[in-house]
Every structure is written in structure tokens, then in C-alpha cells.
Image (spheres, rainbow, N blue to C red):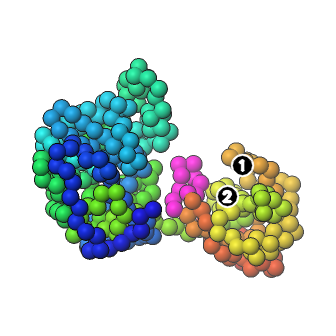
Amino acid sequence: MAVPHDSQDHPTMRWDTHDILPPGFLPMLPTAAAGPLDSADYTYEVKWDGLRVLAGLHGREMILRTGAGQEVQGWFPELAMLRRAAYPEWAVLDGEVVVLDEDGTPSPLLLQRRLRAEDQSEVVRLSEETPAMIKVSDILRIGDSWLLDVAWDERKEIVPRAVQSHQLVKVVTAWPKSEPALVAARMCGLDSVIAKRLRGRYYPGDRTRDWLSIRPREMVDAVICGWMAGRGARATGIGALLLGIRKGRELIYIGHTGTGIDAETLVNLHHELQRGVQRACPFPETPASLNGVPHWVRPELICRIRFTGWTDTGKMRSPTFMEMVTPLGVSPSLVAVGGKAMVR
């Protein structure tokens, strides 16, 4: 795995100008970063969570190559439109292939279905039923001229002049602030953005701090409503906490997590929860997504959870246990208002 480094630590690369898409030439990678981040040194764009590809164009030919080095243009015949939408006769573009569901949000399931097509007839049928779209975010070459050493603030001005947006081809918007990008991402059911340093160059197949993948973290004080038994070393204790928040007098299930709980807290929390075991589920309806037998408890204890956003069904994305809000060993009467614990 490449180790992120500063751009000035990396030597300039040269590539054979006689190949449409040179062998070994792979997409640049972002470095994960916590958010929010706003800096005048960066622009911000939606991270589409699609299939990252490089597009090599020359004459009527087009190659779509993934970060794993696989050529996938055969699975997406409708994306031949990119050849007509790009003005340069010879170009290399960076982008993401996405397939949208009926609500207009990117669907990983539909995308995987496209990639699993086994014969040409299925490829053609799926391209008509669920057409893919390519989101073009960067341009790396025009004719014999590579733009890898050209700073991003110059390349981003070239992209919309080199590629015309179409129903299946869209030029990605780069915002000077992260908030508009995050709003656009969340409207599409996504929750992260890519920050690109304005003076940064392009490093094929490498990971530097010139590109950052930002997934802002949110916090909620959640009511512990039960637990699921663990596996392996946790088989006799807590595997995951079942969590909720109160809306009025009703408890709403918001997901479960076993991530981030240290061994000592696991033991003490398990002992505390066993004292509050009850047969009845504290939620209006038993959550349908539970994989195992739940152990319900009186909804009294509050813990702080960090997560990356909400799903369409009101569940936390990537929840991680941070700390107990209610001290263990103490049993006050509690009420949660708007997700915040308050002691009566």
C-alpha cells in the first residue's frame, strides 16, 4: 500500500506518448482525512463511490481502465458517448462510472450487476435497462502533451472546455468550499467529498496529501436498548449494542455497533446491562435487520456514538462507540430528548 506523502517528495513521472493509455498508468488515490475541512488551498467535489476509471481516447477508440488495471469498456457500450463528448482527438480523462437507481442516486448494486454480465446480449440489455453514466473529474493528457505537472487549478479550467456534458457524460463540479459539495453528496445519498490541492499535480497510482477523501464525523448520544452476543472471544459477552434515540415518547432504532468498545468497558457494560434485562422490545417494532437473538434492556443508559451520516432508512453509517455518557455503576432515572441524555 502506498504511503501518503507530500507532493514535493515525489519525482516527476514520464509516460510513453505512443499508447492510448500506457501500461501501468493508474488513477491517483486520495488520502483519508477527518472533516470538516475548509481551506483556500483546495477545491471540493462529490465522491461518487462509483467505479473509478481512466478513459483513454484516440480517434474512434476508447479504453476504460479501473484502478485494478482491468479494462471495462466492453461492459458499458453506452459510454462510447464519451468519445463524442470529448473534443480532443487524443486525451486521457479521470472519472467515475455510476449507475443511478429510480431516485437518481448512485446504486452500487446496479453497478455490480452491470459488471457481472456474462454475455454480450446481457450487456446490451442492461445498458438499455440501467444505463451507466461517467462523471469526468480531471484531464491528464491532450494529444502528445501530458498535464501531470500542470497544477490542479489550471487543469480544472481545462476539463469543461475539453468535455461537453451529456445525458451520460457529466463534468464534476469543483467548489471552493466543502459545504456545497457535502450538500450535493447527501442529496445523492452519499456522505463524503474529495478535496484537491489547487497547486497539486497528478501522481498516477499514488496516494498523496494533494488529494484528501473527507468523510465528516457526526456525534449522537444514543440510548442503549439491548445487545447482541458476540463471536469468538466475545461469544459470552457483548458483540454489538442496539441503539436508539427518543422522538417524543417513542424510541427510534438507529442501528448497532460493537466497534470502539475496549475490553474493560465491555465487561463492565455487560454486567450493568444484565441488571436491566427485560423481555419486551423497547422499540415500537422489533428491528428487522438484526442478525441474531437480541437481549433487550430497560432504555436507561446513554453512550456517545460517532458516525459518518444517516442512511435513507434512518440508520447511522459506520457507527463507532466513543464513551459512556451515563456513568457505569450508577442508575439514575434518565430521559433522552432529541438524542441528548438528561438526568431527572
Residue at 41% of width from left, 64% of height from top?
Answer: 2
Q: In this view, does 185 lie to the left or right of 204?
A: right
Find disc 2 in the rendering and name its residue.
256
Q: In this view, does 258 lie to the left or right of 152?
A: right
Q: Where is residue 99 in the image (x, y as percent from the top left)?
A: 40, 38
Q: Residue furthest top?
A: 121
Tell me the amino acid under the disc marked 1.
Leu
Q: Give the range drawn in magenta.
A: 308-317
Tell me the amino acid under the disc marked 2.
His
Q: In this view, does 79 lie to the left or right of 148?
A: right
Looking at the rendered structure, the secondary structure element under dot 1 is loop
Nearest to the observer: residue 279 or residue 112: 112
Upstream in the sequence, badge 1 or badge 2?
2
Residue at 35% of width from left, 39% of height from top?
Answer: 71
What is the quadrant of residue 250 in the picture?
bottom right
Residue at 16% of width from left, 55% of height from top?
Answer: 146
Q: In this view, does 271 lie to the left or right of 12?
A: right
Find disc 1 in the rendering and name its residue.
290
- Give the Cα distance between marks 1 and 2: 9 Å
